[in-house]
Image (cartoon, rainbow, N blue to C red):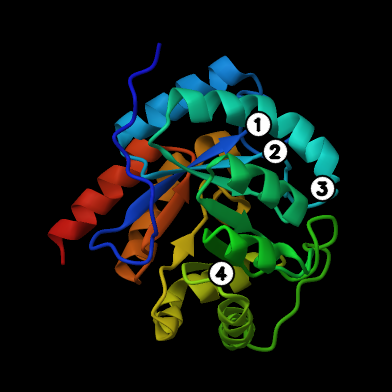
């Protein structure tokens, strides 16, 4: 039914132009598109659209990590995830799929099925076995910074110097991942995860500081509250603001944009390339 993707599976460490990671939420309660893609057919149609519009990677999430949400247990997460994932792997056998999870049990199951990236919002802090599992499968590991957990991360986020504290955090986590045997690492500052709007913009202004690690930098700001709240809008109205901040992120060195709207993000990448 679906045209096969021409994406090539493989490591993400080396690429010349910024890439797009398309978001596929198969949750009932995500902040923007919860409930739209829980069924395999609807999910496949969305994946096909994102691949055709230019997504290099598809990041599948079965647990919402919006502020105030509870962590799903791994069995319930797999119950949501596997019917959709199994269908997508059959329909798009050459696509590069990522799974957004903080459970090593979930990572183990999906990596054995052929998923090539694990996107861990806790950077291994929620599950001490995560890095060992990722290493065993030679997968790419996206490690994100988060202060606290989703259920409490936005209660009272506090930093003396957010950029310096994130640099210190990643320094330790990258060393830990390399010691575990993980070769392919992507870092994500975690916009909106235990950060005020002011913290988010301070990090965005200083994104180039993260180039010190010589690793791909992923930015996930699509339709988030750091965009729509200052403008007095809703997530549904935040595409224009998202494009503005994607442009800023690209100019500051972002190499992967994690997005809901692939076509708009691809336009940002193409136009920014003309300025460089």
Residue 240 is labelled as: none
Q: Earlier in the sequence, mark 4 or mark 1?
A: 1
Q: Residues within 10 Å of mark 3 (few under 14, many from 20)?
A: some
> Tags 2 and 3 in contact by the CB under 8 Å rule?
no
Depth order, front residue of 234/121? 121
Q: Residues within 10 Å of mark 4 (few under 14, many from 20)?
A: many
x 68%, y 50%: residue? 108
Q: Earlier in the sequence, mark 2 or mark 3?
A: 2
Secondary structure beneath dot 1 equals loop
Q: Earlier in the sequence, mark 3 or mark 1?
A: 1
Left or right: 103 with respect to 162?
right
Q: Disc 3 and disc 4: Cα gap in Å?
A: 20 Å
Residue 212: image quadrant is: bottom left
Residue 189 is labelled as: 4
Residue annotated with mark 1 = 26
Front of the two marks 4 and 1: 1
Front of the two marks 2 and 3: 2
Q: Disc 4 and disc 1: Cα gap in Å?
A: 23 Å
Q: Earlier in the sequence, mark 3 or mark 4?
A: 3
Secondary structure beneath dot 3 equals loop
Q: Position of residue 171 (x, y in %)?
A: 57, 86
Q: Earlier in the sequence, mark 4 or mark 2?
A: 2
What is the total number of numbered labels drawn onto the structure image?
4
Secondary structure beneath dot 4 equals loop
Q: Position of residue 17 (x, y in %)?
A: 25, 59
Residue annotated with mark 2 = 62
Left or right: 181 with respect to 158?
left
Residue annotated with mark 3 = 69
Q: Residues within 10 Å of mark 2 (few under 14, many from 20)?
A: many
Secondary structure beneath dot 2 equals loop
Q: Disc 4 and disc 2: Cα gap in Å?
A: 21 Å
């Amino acid at each position: 039914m679906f045209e096969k993707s021409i994406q090539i599976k493989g490591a993400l460490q080396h690429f010349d132009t910024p890439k797009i990671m398309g978001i596929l939420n198969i949750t009932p309660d995500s902040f923007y598109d919860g409930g739209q893609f829980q069924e395999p057919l609807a999910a496949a149609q969305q994946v096909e659209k994102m691949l055709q519009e230019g997504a290099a990677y598809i990041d599948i999430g079965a647990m919402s990590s919006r502020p105030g949400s509870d962590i799903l247990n791994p069995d319930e997460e797999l119950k949501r995830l596997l019917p959709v994932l199994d269908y997508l792997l059959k329909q798009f056998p050459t696509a590069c799929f990522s799974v957004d999870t903080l459970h090593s049990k979930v990572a183990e199951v999906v990596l054995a099925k052929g998923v090539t990236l694990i996107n861990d919002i806790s950077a291994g802090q929620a599950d001490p076995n995560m890095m060992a599992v990722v290493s065993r499968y030679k997968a790419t590991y996206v490690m994100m910074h988060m202060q606290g957990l989703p259920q409490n991360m936005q209660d009272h986020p506090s930093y003396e110097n957010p950029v310096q504290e994130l640099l210190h955090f990643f320094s330790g986590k990258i060393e830990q991942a390399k010691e575990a045997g993980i070769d392919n690492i992507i870092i994500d500052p975690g916009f909106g995860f235990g950060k005020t709007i002011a913290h988010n913009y301070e990090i965005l202004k200083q994104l180039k500081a993260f180039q010190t690690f010589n690793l791909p930098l992923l930015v996930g700001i699509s339709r988030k509250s750091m965009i729509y709240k200052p403008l007095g809008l809703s997530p549904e109205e935040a595409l224009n603001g998202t494009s503005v901040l994607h442009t800023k992120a690209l100019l500051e060195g972002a190499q992967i944009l994690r997005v809901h709207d692939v076509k708009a993000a691809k336009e940002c990448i193409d136009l920014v390339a003309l300025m460089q």
